[in-house]
Image (spheres, grey):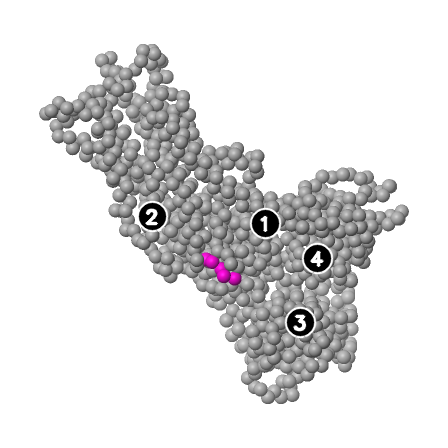
Amino acid sequence: CVGEEIWVDSRTVYIGHKEPPPGAEAYILQRYPDNRIVSSKYTFWNFIPKNLFEQFRRIANFYFLGIFLVQLIIDTPTSPVTSGLPLFFVITVTAIKQGYEDWLRHKADCSINECPVDVVQQGKVVRTQSHKLRVGDIVVVREDETFPCDLILLSSSRHDGTCYVTTASLDGESSHKTYYAVQDTMAFRTEQEVDSLHATIECEQPQPDLYKFVGRINIYKDKEEPVARPLGAENLLLRGATLKNTQHIYAVAVYTGMETKMALNYQSKSQKRSAVEKSMNAFLIVYLCILISKAVINTVLKYAWQWSPDRDEPWYNHRTENERQRHMVIRAFTDFLAFMVLFNYIIPVSMYVTVEMQKFLGSYFITWDEEMFDEELGEGAQVNTSDLNEELGQVEYVFTDKTGTLTENNMEFIECCVDGNVYIPHAICNGQILSAASSIDMIDSSPGGYRREHEDLFFRALCLCHTVQVKEEETVDGIKRGIHQGRPTSFYISSSPDEVALVEGMKRLGYTYLRLKDNYMEILNKDDDIERFELLHVLNFDSVRRRMSVIVKSSSGEYLLFCKGADSSIFPRVVSGKVEQVKARVEQNAIEGLRTLCVAYRRLSECEYQEACHHLNEAKLALQDREQRLAQAYDIIEKDFVLLGATAVEDRLQEKAADTIESLHKAGMKVWVLTGDKMETAAATCYASKLFRRSTQILELTKKRTEEQSLHDVLLSVDCLDFGLIIDGATLSAVLKANQERAGSGNYREIFLEICRNCSAVLCCRMAPLQKAQIVKLIKASKEHPITLAIGDGANDVSMILEAHVGIGIMGKEGRQAARNSDYAIPKFKHLKKMLLVHGHYYYIRIAELVQYFFYKNVCFIFPQFLYQFFCGFSQQHITMETLKRDPSLYRDIAKNSLLRWPVFLYWTCLGVFDAVIFFFGAYFLFDNTTFTSNGQLMTTNTQMMFGNWTFGTLVFTVLVFTVCFSLPWTHTTGPGSITLSSGGLS
């Protein structure tokens, strides 16, 4: 059985829901979830209690609920309506906003769960909905359809029982991967044959690792013993992957719904709270302490003043006889609560109303932004949650996917170099064969015989040394077309997009790869002659060797070994050829950010070929250490090469991707690339996008290095200087696992984090979706607690998008899972620049000053009332958009929540106290020769006129209103489009 045989638990799947025959294992009916996918947070039944619970976790909401209850229970100076109505409004508005956002997620889930799926029942194909699928159902999937759940491949339309799949939405790789049907069922061609299958599958319980699967299938034939076949990851088709270059397949469902590997890699949804909201909660605690202090002081002073028997309550608040007979402690506690209610407006409930409305209405500025509208998609930016608008202005770490996010996933063949001579065809777009006559632009247009021989060998090498498959179509747009008359059109697919670009490039240069048929590779040369080569062996590419080779036999009986690979793996094995000229061209292309490969060959004698076959067959038959023995065999065979030349391919970046990354760096953000792709491919993209510079010193923390040197030695040998870091998923797992195992003897996690802090950029390759989330969580939990942002376009990015403080989905070619589960969705990566540098900047400035202003306003409002007891018993658009985009360093000015720090908060609080003192005593001294009487009335000495509380209070309140409403515009210089956010009243 492929994989580990030690299972913690297992499940039995009855194919077609058929019980095993009598005498076989006992039939145990097991319950499994349906195929429903849920990304929403609430249901119809739990929305009200769950939403109320989350809202009353806010300190202010819980506080005002308490004040409201106090007002209902005891006699207080203010009506319960003054606290209850604003609280009800805040709770209602917030609930409606969050309910609407979750309804959109429900709507998106329904569109997926109601997708049509074909199921085989009683020998016929029946169409049903995706959410009705059950474990054990036999499913029919056709070309270009997405797998509705995790399936075991039983048979395919291809005679060899294989099918080709793209897993871009899972691991970011858009290349075609080959999966294999079960040996005993691969010959099934009809629904009746598949339905006649009597078998069970035993496999492990669901687990999130995309690359591991352990199981076996037991096939019952008449009364014979069941035939057991091993099942591995090569037999498991994952939900979210897409069937390619295969007409149809039959497969059985083993994991459904939230138990599929894609769903298990989803991070559970949790309520995200911004740094501004956390600061508001901290400030509210300070003001709550001030409020309690005020209430305690006034309560104590009241009873100290009333200690004398001739003093009673003021004239407007005489006590009844029952009140006089109450116990002193009860009366004091009641008065304390009354003072709490009187001064409770120092806690600004209207601030939450205004902040919620500002966030909700302000989010439309993103959706209305015409610069973030994409003509190709016909869509603009979307806001899935408005709670995090201001967090866009606080980002310190950006975690981005590669495929489909930084790149268009579109390889372009640029040029090739043969013995130092450069050949440049027209632009080649991956996946399409463009019309136009082939052309060769050469430095020397009259090649000699030796050069012509090397030229032909070079082009043949690239037409033969690959794993490309040919897909043929008889018609294109209803018109029969072909390379030559009568020959069908074709296009190429491969596990590597580089290979497709190279084969297409050779086609434009006159050498066309036609097909692989009966183990013979056919190519069409420049003279329109078909050449046939017998494919004898393929020495597959791996990241350690960084090269691949094929051994072929020409029609003349000559054995040829063709090899292509990275320059560092080819040049040391070359014994002849124009090495210096080719090396110079390779270096020049590398500086320009192109992906380069070198091509070499070797002629084999009959004896050498037989020896190579012996080494390869011996290694392939080994039951132990097969990979190591194959590597040794490859090392013996791949030597003594003749260098032919090199190629240059460009992985086309998304428009302005490099400019966006450069701007984020200037703004003080650190950018990490997290991808499931191979290290070499990802590294080339990082260079092209300017994440890494050619001068950047690269540190590799990869499986290859940790095999050569212990993880402990690798981590401790790193100099903490400025460099770029490359780490793969296996090493990350080792770091985290070692940290748990060595808790007492060493902390690899802290060492790793220290290395990362000193990196200018980080590339994490071969990452499973959950590992992406682990990286984000690791940085979030570091001692600096930085604000993180994750951006991606596929289902494999959902976990990190949900884990980060801010999650952004790109509306890409890999589906809408990322956009649906994100906080914000944008059409292209380039729009991230304006999203952060402009919208993030403005949102933070608006919210920060709005919050400080509310605290200032409420201090001004409440403090005069406190002083009286002793006598009576939007925002600023301060910088233009163009300036913010032109100078990303301005983003640093608002980083780390700089406008909501304690010094700024204390400044606004002290300003409020100062202004309140001026309001009160200014009004006090305005009346010449006036005194407060013992019962709280104001009397003029000359006229003996009595003024009540209403007169004095109205004067103080009027001055207060005018001062606080105009203080914000006076304090700050406003520009075009400014919005005065002093709405919400003084409550």
Measured in 3D between alpha carbons, the distance from the residue under mark 3 to the one under mark 2, in whole angstroms, is: 60 Å
Residue drawn 58% across the image and 58% down it: 813
Measured in 3D between alpha carbons, the distance from the residue under mark 3 to the one under mark 4, in whole angstroms, is: 24 Å
Mark 1 or mark 3: name the one nearer the start of the chain.
3
Q: Name the residue under label 3.
A: 479
- Can you give x and y, in whole percent of width and height, for residue 952 in the image? 21, 29
Mark 2 or mark 4: name the one nearer the start of the chain.
4
Above or below, 357 relative to 716: above
Q: Name the residue under label 4.
A: 142
Given the image, on which type of amino acid does mark 3 rest?
A: Ile
Q: Mark 1 points at which residue?
A: 770
Measured in 3D between alpha carbons, the distance from the residue under mark 2 to the one under mark 1, in whole angstroms, is: 43 Å
* Front residue (pair 278, 561): 278
For residue 873, what is the image quadrant? top left
Residue drawn 80% across the image and 56% down it: 190
- Can you give x and y, in whole percent of width and height, for residue 576 in the image? 63, 80
Q: Which of marks 1 and 4 is in front?
A: 4
Q: Nearer the viewer, mark 2 or mark 1?
A: 2
- Can you give x and y, in whole percent of width and height, for residue 456 in the image? 66, 81
